[in-house]
Amino acid sequence: MVDAGRLRVILSRLRARGRDLAAFAELTAEQYLADPRGVYASKYLLVTGIEDALAVANHVIASEGYRAPADYADAFRSLHQAGVLGADLAERLEGMARFRNLLVHQYDDVDDRRVHGIMRQDLEDLDRFAAAVLQAFPDLA
């Protein structure tokens, strides 16, 4: 059984990071790239936001006895197989998990324009993930 208190805390943190990232996503690419501190901050927020989603996924998987994931991306696939996430969202989150690995392990090689693009196009997926978890576990709301 999921620990509702723990998941509420992580989901709240995930939503807060999403709000902070949304401010960077609203910038034009030129504005974003002109602020190196903002670029660094947004990369950190993106990594930790994805890690929050992974923490929720792994807690749900372990608590509910779902299939253990082989890697970070597979955690979202496991939640899809268990009926928590739709196929499209699971696939998009798998991509985010792989991008998190790129940010963590090859930080300097990541094109900052790509980071900005991901924030503009994919940030909503973290909100969709939180909503799907809340729908699957209504006691969390």
Image (cartoon, rainbow, N blue to C red):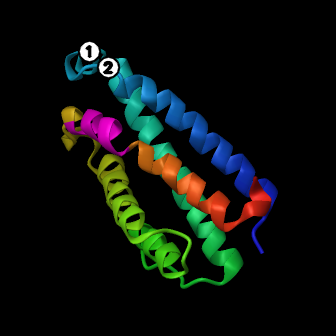
Residue 121 included in the magenta stretch of the image: yes
Work out how far the residue at label 1 is from the one at label 2, CA to CA, in angstroms: 6 Å
How many residues crowd mark 2 within 10 Å: few (<14), some (14–19), many (20+)?
A: few
**Residue underneath mark 2:** 27
Q: Secondary structure at mark 2?
A: loop
Secondary structure mostly seen in magenta is: helix
Q: Residue at x 36, y 65 (%)?
A: 88
Identify which amino acid the numbered label 1 is placed on. Gln
Residue bearing the label numbered 1 = 31
Q: Nearer the viewer, residue 17 or 104?
A: 17
| 25 displayed left or right of 126 | left
Q: Say left or right for 141 vs 109.
A: right
Point out residue 80 in the picture as x, y percentages from the top left corner: 47, 75
The x, y position of residue 37, in whole percent, is: 37, 19
Quarter of the figure with residue 24: top left
Asked if marks 1 and 2 touch (Cβ < 8 Å), the reply is yes
Label 1 Cα neighbours within 10 Å, binned few <14 / some 14-19 / many ≥20: few
Residue at figure coordinates x 25%, y 37% from the top left: 117
Image quadrant in which you'd find residue 30: top left
Q: Residue at x 65, y 76 (%)?
A: 62
Residue at image coords 43%, 67%: 72
Amino acid type, label 2:
Leu
Question: Quadrant of the image for the N terminus?
Answer: bottom right
Span colored in magenta = 114-122
- SS at mark 1 in the image: helix
State the image coordinates of residue 113 (x, y, percent, origin top left).
20, 33
